[in-house]
Amino acid sequence: MQKEIQVICGTVQIPSLREFLKTMNTVSSAHGVIIQGLNAELLAGERHLHFAVGKALRAVAAGTNVAKDPGVEIMRYAAGERQIEKSFAIGLHEGKNRAAFVLLGKRENLLLAFSEIQKIIDEKPCSEMLAYSDAKREGVLALFGITDAEIEAAGEDKIPELVLERVALADLLK
């Protein structure tokens, strides 16, 4: 049976990250789906998210994944990281988050999990939440180690493409 992918975006207040992750695990287990929350402030557009998810799923299918958990593998690629520990930088944090949740599973299970997540987040259009903007610039440059020289060479408008390059190279950089 083909797994489907669903993305839901919005703002979520997280008083305790540990408790929030427990809740996500409960929803995930109850419906047999994978749920991975990412910090939308560090995603450089919809292409970035979809490219990272695709790379992660291909790695899992090919058995070349670094993380045992497919959700963590998605986070690893989204962060453009080989090392799992460093990839947590693109995850959610305590306090107010602009978040993107990636859900993987069978359609009927996804719909149930999706509706549970809708109850805990203030849903916003993903096109708006994921779009790269000047407000994201500093965080994105820091996370992906994009230098002024690279921006000078490629152009300010190419920052999202430089991020995609980091995601593509995540397997090669050791």
Image (tube, rainbow, N blue to C red):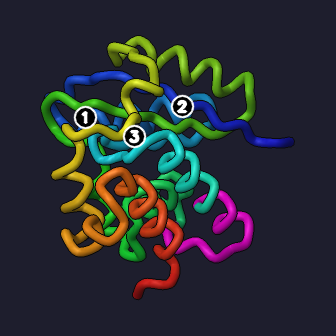
Residue 126: give x, y in percent of width and height. Answer: 46, 26
Left or right, 66 with reference to 111? left
State if disc 3 and disc 1 touch (CB < 8 Å).
no
Magenta-colored stretch includes residue 28: no
Magenta-colored stretch includes residue 60: yes
Q: Residue at x 58, y 60 (%)?
A: 56
Circle 1 crowding by C-alpha within 10 Å: few under 14, some 14–19, many from 20 = few
Vertical placement of residue 2 versus 152, above or below: above
Inspect the image, locate mark 1, and give the three-letter code of the amino acid beneath it: Glu
Q: Which callout, 3 or 2, points to the residue nearer the camera?
A: 2
Q: Which residue is mark 2?
A: 7
Distance between mark 3 and mark 2 Cα atoms: 10 Å
Distance between mark 1 and mark 3 Cα atoms: 14 Å
Magenta-tinted stretch:
56-67
Residue 51: give x, y in percent of width and height. Answer: 57, 53
Q: Which residue is mark 1?
A: 19
Of callouts 2 and 1, which one flags the residue occurring earlier in the amino acid sequence?
Answer: 2
Left or right, 163 with reference to 61? left
Left or right, 121 with reference to 18? right
Q: Which residue is mark 3?
A: 37
Circle 3 crowding by C-alpha within 10 Å: few under 14, some 14–19, many from 20 = many
Label 2: which secondary element: strand
Q: Residue at x 25, y 34 (%)?
A: 19
Residue 158: give x, y in percent of width and height. Answer: 39, 56
Inspect the image, locate mark 2, and give the three-letter code of the amino acid beneath it: Val
Q: Quadrant of the C terminus?
A: bottom left
Q: Residue at x 51, y 38 (%)?
A: 102
Residue at the far bottom in the pictured view: 174
Circle 2 crowding by C-alpha within 10 Å: few under 14, some 14–19, many from 20 = some
55 vs 62, nearest the viewer: 55
Q: Residue at x 39, y 40 (%)?
A: 37
